[in-house]
Image (cartoon, grey):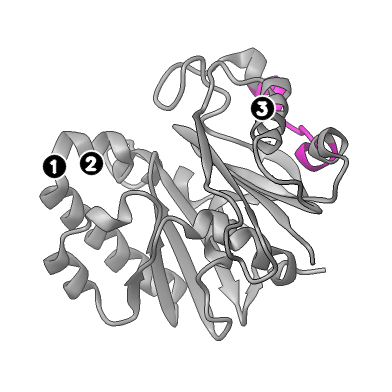
């Protein structure tokens, strides 16, 4: 039986568990706050230390924020900051992270096969039905995005960094900072506005809203989004660690 160490890396916290082949957790998840400033070396060490607290696995799945191509970091918005999301960017960290081969570094650290994807992509792997065009948006520190076509993961779009209004990106427009500032009711209206604006862009068959803040969307706003929009549990960010291996394109 193949066990998978699944690690969900966010802007505020990093959590992990070990899953069996059916995607069932074999151990209670462990979590640590995301340390800042976060160099690639500290990132690898933090993940390895988390893994040491859990049962031995035969492979590792890592979901992390940003544009990840073939396990290499093209851009990661939070980890290049001095003290976490919405703080100043550290030019040295930006240089360290750009082009960092996370998959190679983690493969060496764990001495196991490693799959590194955007965190929303791993989240989506845990919930998609596998038919039609399925979009996954995760609401947490910022906005995560993953698109699946017929059950296969499509090329990643870093939608979170696209401009929306007033000079804000989607990351800041509906991220955690704005939710706290606006309150859940007004923030939920803003999320619905984003969903309505993206509908003609993606023409999805199903939209999944996940991440830690999805459960805070007011029911009246969710009802107005339509039957093709579904809220899914945040645990998908770990549970998807198994299925992600079969949904990525060769």
Quadrant hosting residue 248: bottom right
- Which residue is identified by label 1? 183
Q: Look at the numbered discs 1 and 3 and tell me whether their residues touch, using CB distance below 8 Å.
A: no
Residue 31 higher or lower than 97, as above or below:
below
- State the residue at coordinates (48%, 34%): 13
Residue found at x 84% / y 41%: 107
Q: Quadrant of the N terminus?
A: bottom right
Regarding residue 121, the answer to whether it shows in the image is no
Q: How many marks?
A: 3
The residue at which mark 2 appears reads as 179
The majority secondary structure of the magenta stretch comes to helix
Q: Secondary structure at mark 1?
A: loop
Q: Is residue 120 above or below residue 86?
A: below
Dot 3 lies on which element?
Answer: helix
The answer to if 100 sits in the magenta stretch is: yes
Position of 83 with respect to 231 (left or right) is right
Q: Secondary structure at mark 2?
A: helix
User: Can residue 219 be spotted in the picture?
Assistant: yes
Give the residue at x 50% y 39%: 10
Point out the frontmost of discs 3 and 2: 3
Mark 1–mark 2 Cα distance, whole angstroms, equals 6 Å
């Amino acid at each position: 039986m193949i066990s998978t160490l699944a690690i969900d890396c966010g802007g505020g916290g990093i959590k992990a568990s070990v899953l069996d082949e059916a995607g069932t957790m074999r151990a209670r998840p462990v979590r640590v706050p995301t340390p800042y400033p976060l160099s690639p070396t500290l990132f690898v060490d933090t993940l390895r230390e988390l893994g040491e607290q859990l049962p031995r696995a035969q492979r590792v799945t890592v979901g992390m924020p940003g544009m990840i191509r073939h396990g290499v970091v093209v851009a990661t918005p939070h980890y290049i900051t001095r003290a976490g999301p919405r703080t100043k960017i550290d030019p040295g960290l930006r240089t360290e992270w750009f082009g960092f081969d996370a998959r190679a570094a983690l493969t060496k650290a764990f001495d196991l096969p490693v799959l590194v994807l955007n965190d929303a992509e791993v989240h989506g792997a845990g919930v998609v039905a596998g038919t039609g065009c399925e979009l996954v948006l995760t609401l947490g520190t910022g906005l995560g995005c993953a698109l699946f076509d017929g059950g296969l993961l499509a090329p990643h779009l870093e939608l979170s960094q696209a401009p929306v209004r007033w000079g804000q990106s989607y990351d800041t427009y509906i991220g955690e900072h704005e939710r706290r500032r606006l309150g859940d009711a007004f923030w939920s209206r803003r999320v619905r506005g984003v969903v309505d604006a993206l509908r003609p862009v993606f023409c999805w068959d199903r939209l999944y809203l996940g991440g830690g803040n999805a459960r805070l969307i007011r029911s009246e706003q969710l009802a107005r989004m339509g039957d093709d929009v579904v809220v899914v549990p945040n645990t998908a960010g770990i549970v998807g660690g198994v299925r992600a291996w079969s949904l990525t394109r060769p």
